[in-house]
Amino acid sequence: MGTKYSVNSSSSIRSSGEPVIPLPLEILEEIFLNLPPQHVVCVCRLVCRQWKVVADSESFWRERCRREGYHLRDPSRVPSNNWRLFYFLCKKRRNLIKNPRAEDEFRSWRILKNGGDKWTIEGSKVQHSNPAVQKNYVTSFDWCTKVQVIDLMKEGYSPSFMDEFQPPIRISDWYGARSDCGSIYIISVQLLDHKKNVLKNFRPQDVTIPQWNDEQWHQMEYVFKDYGPGVRYVRFTHGGKDTQFWAGWYGIRVTESCVEICPALDS
């Protein structure tokens, strides 16, 4: 069966901090490559100096990225001394918008304009391509807009990583209208510096959906690339109104808003 090692037992480590039975680094690396990454970081690297050297090495995390298919979008931007961060940011890629589907009312959103009969929430009238989307926000007969500001550092994206690597930032939003009432949809997404000055801005033309439409969901999508150093926040603003000035909630509907940091190529 071979020798068993217990990382929780002090008997497996000499007082010098060296393992009882040293292994060639290549074999130790291969073992670590077949362990869960959290186990390597939180357990293995604490066992002894030799294990820590392997667990902290850039070559180990670069090889882990290669084996799991996390390839650089731009080979000229290599995350020097940051392959471990690159790996975990790829593995834990996620939507940075909180409460995108109105499941928790307006929590995490700040309402900027609340015109007409104000923002409200309703169950989706038309099935979305994502079955998890069951609710949406809906606007009224005057302008309704809301915003979220994402602090990238708080989300785990260090200034050095953002400046050196400049990973693409993908934004997405879904919008739709009632079939019996026209609507206007607006969106603005800005990349901000540490003082919240605007560095880059995505602000397409307003989208007008006519009355007597097919009531289907539409997606707005954009990717920020090569935006330069200094990005620390993302400000996501959207909303709209109806075109008929009808009392109630006949305006544009929005849901499944998304901001993603995308360090690696999509597989």
Image: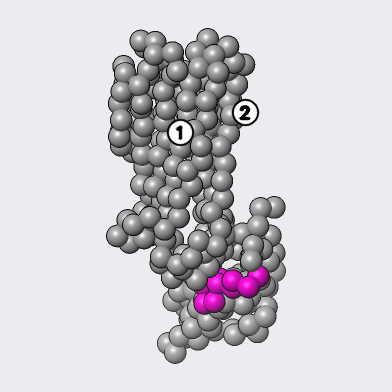
Three-letter code for the amino acid on which mark 2 is drawn: Ser
From the viewer's side, name the closer residue of 100 and 233.
233
Q: Which stretch appears magenta? A: 75-85
- Residue 42 showing in the rendered view: no
Q: For the point 44% across and 89% down, which residue is it?
A: 16
- Residue 35 showing in the rendered view: yes
Image position, residue 100 (x, y; %): 44, 35
> Which comes sooner in the sequence, label 1 or label 2?
2
Image position, residue 129 (x, y; %): 62, 28
Is label 1 in a helix, a strand or a loop?
A: strand
Position of residue 25 in the picture relative to residue 82 (left or right):
right
Image position, residue 171 (x, y; %): 52, 45
Q: Which residue is mark 1?
A: 186
**Mark nearer the viewer, 1 or 2:** 1
Is label 2 in a helix, a strand or a loop?
A: loop
Query: What secondary structure predominates along the stretch shown in magenta?
Result: loop
State the mark number for residue 129: 2
- Indicate how the structure is coloured in the image: one colour
From the viewer's side, name the closer residue of 166 and 140.
140
Q: For the point 48% across and 21% down, which residue is it?
A: 183
Which quarter shows the N terminus? bottom right
Disc 1 from disc 2: Cα separation: 21 Å
* Figure check: 190 above or below 42: above
Three-letter code for the amino acid on which mark 1 is drawn: Ile
